[in-house]
Amino acid sequence: MLFFSYTFVIFVIAFFCLYWSVPNVTVRRWVLLLGCALFLIYYSGPAGVLPIVLLAVGTYFAGLSRRRWLCVIWIAVCTASLLFYKYTNFLFQGLVAGLSPDMAQLGRQFTKTLLPAAPPLGISFFAFEFIHYLTEIHRGRRPICSPLRFGLFSFFWPTVVAGPIKRYRQFTVSAGSGMRQVSLDDVREGMVRIAVGVVKKFTADSLTAWIGFIDHDYAVLPLERRWLIFGAIGMRILLDFSGYSDMAIGFARMMGIRIPENFNWPYLAVSINDFWHRWHISLSTWIRDYIYIPLGGSRHGLFRKGLNALFAMALCGLWHGASWNFVLWGLYHGLGLVLSNNLGRVIRRWGGQLHQPLQALPGGNAVVVISRGCFLGLCWCSTVFFVFVGWLLFFYPVAKAWEMTKLLFVR
């Protein structure tokens, strides 16, 4: 994507040479803002930048006013903008599916005329960050008063492409202190992190090419080759997503700014709940804080808790793409979270009763350790299998994902 082009390499070299050569922190902030503007204008174009700038200006003044009703209105505007640019075709196709072919064709031409060829660059990340910012102001947090600092938070170029989703208080504190003096350790560690991200991304691209080359013959492949593709898809998605996060974190570190980690060895998770504490952390915590908890979280009984989890995860899936397979992938993980939480409660009770008499036996402690190790291994295997099956739904249309899943068990 954008991080892999000669133009981007030239931009990065020129930007950091200028950024590091400026000792004054205020001038350095203006250099960073200029870099953000050039990045967005070049890769998104004036038509793509204008909606983002308008949303940012409205968000800044709505937050500065501290009027709760104005924050709510602008949250609605940000949400409507995201729906318009990213989901109009998806929503419209659902509405016109039952109409006559002529009406459906007319509707598709209308939306093609109304919408740009592609949504503004990073519209999902911009919208979520602006909604987060206004929600926190609505809850009584102090806004960013400086237009320059708000602009840096809004348009920070390393996170535009693929996140992580920033929290404004953490970002402004880090930018305020880190930009004053960039150390050699910051530069070195940032470069190492970028190199790790580049290796991950090239590996992901190689896996993508290999999967695309042989997956059309999936049904006639030997069973072990199908399982190999199955595993490669899961690794490809992890390496692709985490590779971009690594590069964004590395570029920010080279500026003296620290942004949050986004992945924490997710394939070591021993439950679906554990997986979502490790996978795309900035998104999962955003979904938790601004959708799941406001809906009631776990405060209104198991049934309501399950519904809240399913709805929140359906939105999480839809955030990744305007297609039914993403919605179903979100619901799939929502169901996994419900089962994981409820089974976890039963297992903890059962495990406590089981291990209590074992400890009274000769060598009981060793038995407990071995049994717990075997149990954790079983939990890990089932979690990874559940997640990797979900990646088929994430990676392919629903019908193909279903066929590929069935063929995993047919020789």
Image (tube, helix red, strand yellow):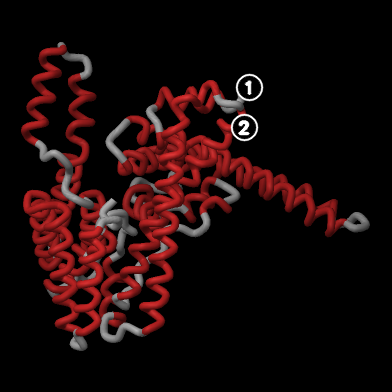
* Residue 123, visible in the rendered structure: yes
Residue at point 50% right, 46% down?
A: 235
The earlier-in-sequence mark between 1 and 2 is 2
Left or right placement of residue 254 versus residue 399 in this view: left
Instruction: Classify mark 2: residues with Cα within 10 Å, few (<14), some (14-19) or many (20+).
Output: few
Seen in the image, is 221 located left or right of residue 370? left
Among all residues in the image, which is located at the extreme top? 100
The answer to which quarter of the image holds residue 90 is: top left
How far apart are labels 1 and 2 at the CA level? 9 Å
Image height check: is 229 above or below 271?
Answer: above
92 to 38, vertically: above or below: above
Query: Residue at position x 61%, y 28% from top?
Result: 223
Q: Is residue 172 above or below residue 167?
A: below
**Residue type of the residue flagged with mark 2:** Glu
User: Does dot 1 land on a helix, a strand or a loop?
Assistant: loop
Q: Nearer the viewer, residue 236 or 314?
A: 236
Question: Residue 406 placed where, x, y %?
Answer: 54, 23
Q: Residue at x 32, y 39 (%)?
A: 318
The quadrant where residue 151 appears: bottom left
Residue lying at the far bottom in this picture: please name it: 23
Residue 200: image x %, image y %?
A: 44, 55
Category of crowding for the residue at label 1, using alpha-carbon neighbours closer than 10 angstroms: few (below 14), some (14–19), many (at least 20): few
Q: Residue at x 16, y 48 (%)?
A: 120
Q: Tell me the amino acid under the disc marked 1.
A: Arg
The x and y percentages for residue 31 are: 16, 75
Tell me the residue that label 2 is attached to. 224
Screen quadrant of the C terminus: top right
Rendered position, 405 above or below 41 = above
Relative placement, left or right, of 115 versus 305 is left
Tell me which corner region of the image, top left, top right, bottom left or bottom right, holds residue 261.
bottom left
**Residue 299 seen from this side:** no
